[in-house]
Image (tube, coloured by chain):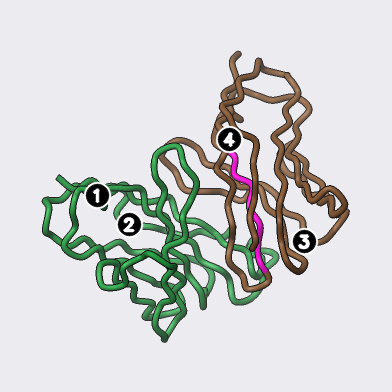
Chain colours: A green, B brown
Amino acid sequence: GAVVSQHPSRVICKSGTSVKIECRSLDFQATTMFWYRQFPKQSLMLMATSNEGSKATYEQGVEKDKFLINHASLTLSTLTVTSAHPEDSSFYICSARAVTEWTSGGVAKNIQYFGAGTRLSVL
Amino acid sequence: GDSVTQMEGPVTLSEEAFLTINCTYTATGYPSLFWYVQYPGEGLQLLLKATKADDKGSNKGFEATYRKETTSFHLEKGSVQVSDSAVYFCALGSTLGRLYFGRGTQLTVWP
């Protein structure tokens, strides 16, 4: 089936440092990837939509200079949390949407497949 | 705008009990509807989906029917197992491709 790899799974950093999170679609191409943030016992909040080769579209209230998104290829998007502070501590999840259907591989078109998430803790 | 309202949890059941988690939606156009499951410390996995009215999505014993007349997509399972313990999210997929999630329902199944 469709596999989305997200790395690292957990990161602890000091306040003021930057952290990069990678999201890769392993067996399919994704023109669009999404980045979500999840607070404890709450739902997912869409932060931004990332399209390959173009600038990301950020949701209202999300600082684009703080959360830098790069979607350099059809299989990789990165989220960089710049100058992280304790209030940025959260669970970040990416998803990827397939370009084409691959029935035998368990990949459906226009379905979002999710990574396992990254737990960010800023001290 | 598009939104999803999901039954508040937590839900606690004994093994082999019947499960229902309610989900209703508000949408413009003709959205797709999804149920995702999240196990502790993990991302979301697609459980089932329905793309048009009266479609029934099913997987691993779970079912949900897209009811346009009641704008609902309730999740059901006839006999839950301990391994079904997780958080379940109802989601609406807009025609523009973004997902709108409900708040999630924590399910705990006791042996």
| Callout 4: SS | strand
Q: Position of residue A51 (x, y in %)?
A: 46, 79
Q: Quadrant of residue A73?
A: bottom left
N-term mark: 3 or 4: 3
Query: Circle 4: is it few (<14), some (14-19), or many (20+) Cα within 10 Å?
Result: many
Left or right, B14 with respect to A3, comes to right
| Discs 2/3, front | 3
Quadrant of res B89: top right
Total numbered labels: 4
Residue contact at pointers 3 and 1, CB within 8 angstroms: no
**For residue B55, which quarter of the picture?**
bottom right
Separation of residues labelled 1 and 4 (CA atoms):
25 Å
Distance between the Cα atoms at labels 4 and 2?
A: 27 Å
Q: Pick the residue in front: A62 or A74.
A: A62
Of badges 1 and 4, the one in the foreground is 1
B24 is within the stretch colored magenta: no
The chain carrying label 2 is: A
Q: Which residues are magenta?
A: B88-94
**Image marks 2 and 1: residues in contact by CB distance under 8 Å:** no
**Foreground label between 3 and 4:** 4
Measure the C-alpha gap from mark 2 to mark 1: 21 Å
**Whether marks 3 and 4 lie on the same chain:** yes
